[in-house]
């Protein structure tokens, strides 16, 4: 019984945290071979070497041995309604949307179905060590309610918004400029800031919104500046050409958002693979976030996001699965894909940089670095415990590791949900 009621916990194992950004400072990662994380009332109150840490009286001890305790993964861009059609074969973006995605999303007006898939999605996310997800819902308010209800029930920090589309989508998946504004506003007022939930204003992308709808959502964002705004930008070359046709007076793709009040520091731009110089400069000037979706970029054949160059140019970059355009629910697999894409761009991202992107980097684009994504006093206790020997192939490679990075990298490259030994949400073990 004590295990269920204890409010203070001490987790022992290897620990990984960050004192800064390893893209700028190779000394930023902090690793303890025998570390401790103290959790009280859902919050991390201290972390450091196990032998020197102050242990609160009555704290329950969880000894994870040689396993690695780190912040839970943060998936900064995904589509929970696409859970059931992940890994659909053979299309590029626009055909993939029309043939696979829209028919599935049309089902989410059914509250029971939305609830079923939301529960399935969070089961999968947690099994893969993802403790915060930023999702697109569908145009249906029910789909937002289902996601938030399920996240709230599990005590998760979670974000989503109604996906708005008023053109170039099937009839049953179109709203209007006015209804997108009204429905988004009502959902925002219901859910934003409730427990650990955050509403995200969500125009899907410029091809599926009229200028009037973009304008309406820009106006809503101006009324709620503490909300994030998420959309897609410059994912595939055919998409960019289409945007030029649809918005003949726009300077570029970003301008279709900028001209309608949809550019700001709390903007999240998914993909952002083929940006022009002006777009990159403007996004950097504003401090908006870019979200890298590497398994999606290879799966749908979109292109090679330049993580190292954009990071060294000072961009804020988060990491995401983009389920179900992405081909995996695993942020480990996503880190591996980010590594491989960067290799194709001539840069080998360090394991510390990959782990940072999946935790602190994503938290940074969400403006949540004071709450999630790291092991530090005051942070919410969303944690993952990684088994660095989870399969025979990984174990035999890790056995030869000379340091923590050689020990972690095989799990990044070859690991999956079998590497997730435990997950903590808000200071409670939910998978142990
Ligand atoms: N662009 C607009 N909608 C989507 C989507 O659902 N997935 C991906 N990968 N790109 C998009
Ligand atoms: Zn997406």
Image: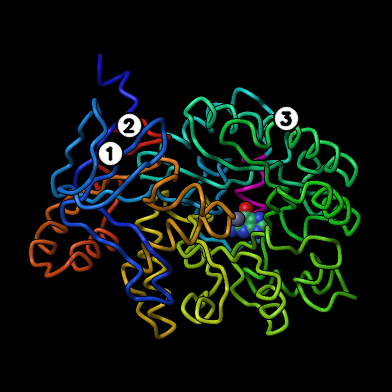
Kindly check if marks 1 and 2 are in contact, taking CB atoms under 8 A apart as contact. Answer: yes
What residue sits 62% from the left and 40% below the top? 104
Q: Earlier in the sequence, mark 3 or mark 2?
A: 3
Query: Which residue range is magenta in the image?
Result: 95-105
Please indicate, yes or no, whether residue 325 appears anywhere in the rendered image: yes
Determine whether, in the image, residue 200 is placed left or right of residue 400: right
Circle 3/circle 2 CB separation < 8 Å = no
Give coordinates of residue 368: x percent, y percent: 55, 51
Which of the marked residues, 3 or 1, is nearer the chain's N terminus?
3
Residue 183: say if magenta.
no
Label 1 crowding class (10 Å Cα cut-off): few <14, some 14-19, many 20+?
many
Q: Residue furthest top?
A: 1
What residue is shown with label 2? 429
Most foreground residue, 296 or 292: 292
Report whether the residue tagged 3 is closer than 8 Å to ligand 2. Answer: no
Q: Quadrant of the N terminus?
A: top left
**Would you call the spot at circle 2 few (<14 residues within 10 Å), some (14-19), or many (20 or more)?**
some
- 209 or 149: nearer the eye? 149
Q: Residue 120 location in percent, x, y?
A: 46, 32
| Residue 43 appears left or right of 230 | left
Q: Is residue 350 above or below residue 382?
A: below
When the figure is inspected, residue 133 is found, relative to residue 233, above or below; the finding is above
For the residues labelled 1 and 2, the Cα–Cα distance comes to 7 Å
Q: CA distance from mark 3 to mark 1?
A: 32 Å
| Residue matched to label 3 | 190
């Amino acid at each position: 019984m004590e295990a269920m009621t204890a409010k203070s916990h001490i987790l022992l194992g290897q620990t990984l945290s960050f004192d800064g950004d390893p893209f700028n400072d190779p000394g930023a990662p902090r690793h303890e071979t025998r570390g401790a994380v103290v959790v009280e009332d859902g919050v991390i109150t201290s972390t450091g070497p196990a032998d020197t840490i102050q242990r609160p009286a009555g704290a329950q001890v969880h000894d994870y041995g040689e396993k690695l305790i780190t912040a839970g993964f943060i998936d900064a861009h995904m589509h929970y309604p696409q859970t059931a059609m992940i890994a659909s074969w053979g299309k590029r973006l626009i055909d993939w949307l029309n043939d696979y995605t829209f028919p599935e999303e049309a089902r989410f007006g059914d509250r029971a179905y939305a609830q079923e898939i939301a529960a399935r999605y969070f089961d999968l996310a947690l099994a893969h060590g993802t403790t915060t997800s930023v999702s697109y819902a569908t145009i249906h308010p029910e789909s937002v309610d289902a996601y938030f209800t399920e996240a709230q029930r599990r005590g998760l920090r979670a974000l989503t918004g109604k996906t708005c589309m008023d053109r170039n989508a099937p009839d049953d998946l179109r709203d209007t400029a006015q209804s997108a504004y009204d429905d988004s506003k009502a959902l925002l007022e219901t859910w934003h800031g409730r427990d650990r939930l955050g509403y995200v204003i969500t125009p899907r992308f410029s091809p599926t919104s009229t200028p009037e709808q973009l304008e309406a959502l820009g106006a809503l964002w101006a009324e709620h500046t503490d909300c994030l705004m998420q959309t897609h930008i410059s994912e595939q070359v055919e998409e960019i050409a289409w945007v030029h046709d649809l918005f003949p007076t726009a300077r570029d793709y970003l301008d279709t958002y900028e001209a309608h009040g949809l550019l700001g520091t709390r903007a999240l731009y998914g993909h952002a693979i083929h940006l022009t110089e002006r777009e990159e400069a403007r996004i950097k000037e504003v401090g908006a976030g870019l979200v890298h979706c590497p398994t999606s970029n290879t799966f749908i054949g979109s292109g090679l996001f330049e993580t190292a160059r954009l990071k060294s140019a000072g961009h804020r970059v988060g990491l995401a699965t983009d389920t179900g355009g992405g081909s995996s629910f695993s942020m480990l697999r996503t880190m591996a894909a980010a590594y491989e894409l960067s290799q194709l761009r001539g840069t080998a991202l360090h394991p510390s940089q990959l782990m940072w992107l999946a935790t602190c980097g994503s938290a940074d684009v969400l403006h949540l670095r004071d709450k999630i994504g790291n092991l530090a006093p005051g942070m919410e206790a969303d944690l993952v415990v990684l088994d660095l020997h989870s399969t025979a192939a990984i174990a035999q490679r890790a056995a030869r590791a000379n340091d923590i990075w050689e020990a972690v990298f095989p799990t990044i490259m070859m690991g999956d949900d079998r590497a997730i030994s435990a997950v903590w949400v808000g200071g409670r073990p939910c998978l142990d």
